[in-house]
Image: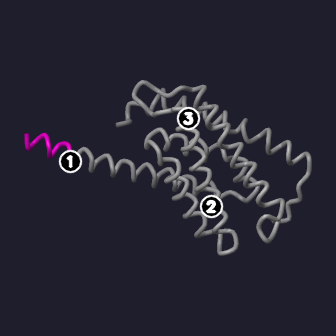
Amino acid sequence: MEAYLLYQKGGTWMQKIQRLFIIALFGSIIFVTNVFLPSPLNYLIIVVQAVLLALSGLFIPKVGATSAGAVGGLLTALISGAALGPFTFFFAFLFGVFVDTFLFIFKIKGSRQGASRNRLMAAMAASTLLIAVSSYLAFTTGFFYFSLLVQRSPMLDVLVVFMGPVTGAVAGYAAAYLWNKYLRHLSA
């Protein structure tokens, strides 16, 4: 009986370390993609960040994407400087919250049986649409004290509304493929 209890305690401890490792790894990759690419290009490859947030949400129920987004946002904010740092952290964190929220709404769980590809695509399309629209509007409408020299236009509006869900659907498909083919056996 004591051996079983020790195993249970050790298993819980090992799961916590695995969760921290996943959060740190995915958050660091998000940081690298945000920092080492120039500003317009890092937003074009948001699909990488979306895939990592989806996978972290599958590995760690309820707060996986939020935690990975917070770590990636914090690391990026430290490099971004005092002017853009808080916004960088806030939107990375908010993206993780959106992903976790839609994984919960669509009842998507990372299990050994796999994840529903269509539901994951829908959840990621909704979350990337929300983060695209909210960050776009925040920086173009002067919600903050500056507009980053980006003026709203109908073409940019359509592009953001179209590319947000498309990027999310692609990220959801990629995350479902990776989870179902390679990663589902690693889940606890």
Amino acid at circle 3 = Ala
The residue that label 1 is drawn on is: 9
Quadrant of the image containing the C terminus: top left
Query: Are circles 2 and 1 on residues that touch, CB within 8 Å?
Result: no
Please tell me whether the stretch drawn in magenta is mainly helix, strand or loop: helix
Q: Residue at x 52, y 56 (%)?
A: 28
Secondary element at image label 2? helix
Which color scheme is applied? one colour
The residue carrying pointer 2 sits among few (fewer than 14), some (14 to 19) or many (20 or more) residues within 10 Å by Cα, namely some
x, y percentage for residue 7? 17, 43
Judged from this view, the residue extending furthest toward the bottom is: 82
Q: In the drawing, what numbered circle is on residue 90? A: 2
Q: Is residue 185 above or below residue 69?
A: above
Q: Secondary structure at mark 3?
A: helix
The magenta segment is 1-10
Residue drawn at 70 percent across, 46 percent down: 130
Which one is nearer the viewer's eye here, 35 or 105?
A: 105
Q: Is tag 2's residue or tag 1's residue first in the polypeptide sequence? A: 1
Q: Residue at x 70, y 73 (%)?
A: 83
Position of 13 compared to 31: left or right? left
Residue 74: say if magenta. Answer: no
Q: Position of residue 128 (x, y in %)?
A: 68, 43
> Alpha-carbon distance for marks 2 and 3?
24 Å
List the residue tagged with mark 3.
Answer: 175
Q: Say left or right for 146 vs 77.
A: right
Give the tally of numbered discs.
3
Q: Is residue 91 left or right of residue 110?
A: right
